[in-house]
């Protein structure tokens, strides 16, 4: 462990590269888990009756990313 | 909650002729090339079979089909395997091309058609929200893009100036 910022940033980049290089199926399972966690957090934070689908809405043609 | 089940359902829908062609876009599409990032929905771009006497682009057949196969409607979404799925017609020439040129990928024996990395990056540039710019940077930093192919797409779709601006803003050492 180090407080050397360049080293910290490089380790973050390495972690992201490692995640990106995982098999697609594994990454999709991670998306499943992230989604479940996000829903759980929103469920706790949102008042009853509010939509679970809230976010940075975009026009349909802009939804490719 | 299983995104692979969503892909399987869309494959069946295509095989049954409800849609002509599909491709995964959005954050889920980007996950095929980058590290996973949390997202709330799955964006599926679709080409439709126009029906005589109906609007050329109608999602009704999709909704009817998926409801009959266990999907639940929630506003503009169909919930499949716990995921809200949004079906989108390609609204721009760039999105049309992305759908046409989408690539087939294998997910543990299941075929999934996904926008190419270059098209996802070009669409991010065109869309231009903060999160799109962040994702475009991810594509660049990851080395996931074929530079020649990416530049070709930008040129053909009038995005060269937007790209120069993006480069000045985010990829240049001097302001």
Image (cartoon, rainbow, N blue to C red):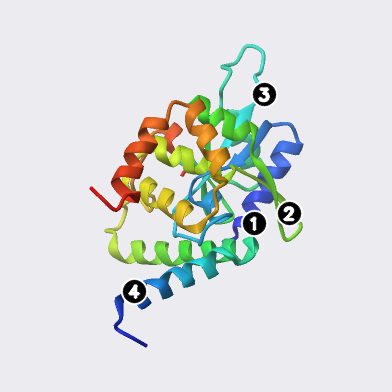
- From mark 1 to mark 3, how far is it between C-alphas? 25 Å
**Label 2 with label 1: CB-CB less than 8 Å:** yes
Chain letter of mark 4 equals: A
CB of mark 2 within 8 Å of CB of mark 3? no
Within 10 Å of disc 3 (Cα), the crowding (few <14, some 14-19, many 20+) is some
Residue at the far left in the pictured view: B175
Residue situated in front as seen by the camera: B11 or A52: B11
* Residue under disc 2 on the same chain as residue under disc 1: yes
Residue where numbered disc 2 is placed: B110
Compared with B86, B109 (above or below) is: below
Q: Give the CA distance from mark 2 to mark 1.
A: 8 Å
For label 4, the crowd category at 10 Å Cα-Cα, with few meaning under 14, some 14 to 19 and many 20 or more, is few
Q: Are marks 4 and 3 in contact (CB under 8 Å)?
A: no
Residue drawn 67% across and 43% down?
A: B103
Q: Residue at x 54, y 44 (%)?
A: B147
Residue linked to disc 1:
B4
């Amino acid at each position: 462990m180090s407080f050397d910022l360049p080293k910290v940033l490089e380790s973050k980049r390495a972690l992201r590269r490692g995640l990106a290089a995982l098999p697609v199926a594994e990454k999709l399972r991670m998306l499943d888990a992230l989604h479940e966690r996000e829903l759980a957090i929103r469920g706790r934070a949102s008042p009853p009756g509010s939509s679970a689908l809230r976010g940075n809405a975009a026009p349909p043609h802009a939804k490719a990313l | 909650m299983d995104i692979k089940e969503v892909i399987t359902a869309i494959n069946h829908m295509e095989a049954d002729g409800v849609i002509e062609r599909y491709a995964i876009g959005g954050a889920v599409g980007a996950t095929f090339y980058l590290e996973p990032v949390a997202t709330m929905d799955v964006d599926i771009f679709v080409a439709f079979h126009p029906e005589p006497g109906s609007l050329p682009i109608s999602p009704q057949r999709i909704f009817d089909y998926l409801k009959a196969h266990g999907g639940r409607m929630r506003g503009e979404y169909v919930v499949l395997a716990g995921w809200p799925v949004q079906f989108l017609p390609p609204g721009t020439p760039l999105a049309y091309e992305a759908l046409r040129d989408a690539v087939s990928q294998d997910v543990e024996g299941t075929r999934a058609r996904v926008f190419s990395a270059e098209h996802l990056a070009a669409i991010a540039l065109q869309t231009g929200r903060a999160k799109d710019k962040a994702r475009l940077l991810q594509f660049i930093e990851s080395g996931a893009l074929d530079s020649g192919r990416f530049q070709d797409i930008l040129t053909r779709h009038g995005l060269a100036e937007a790209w120069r601006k993006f480069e000045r803003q985010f990829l240049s050492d001097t302001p």
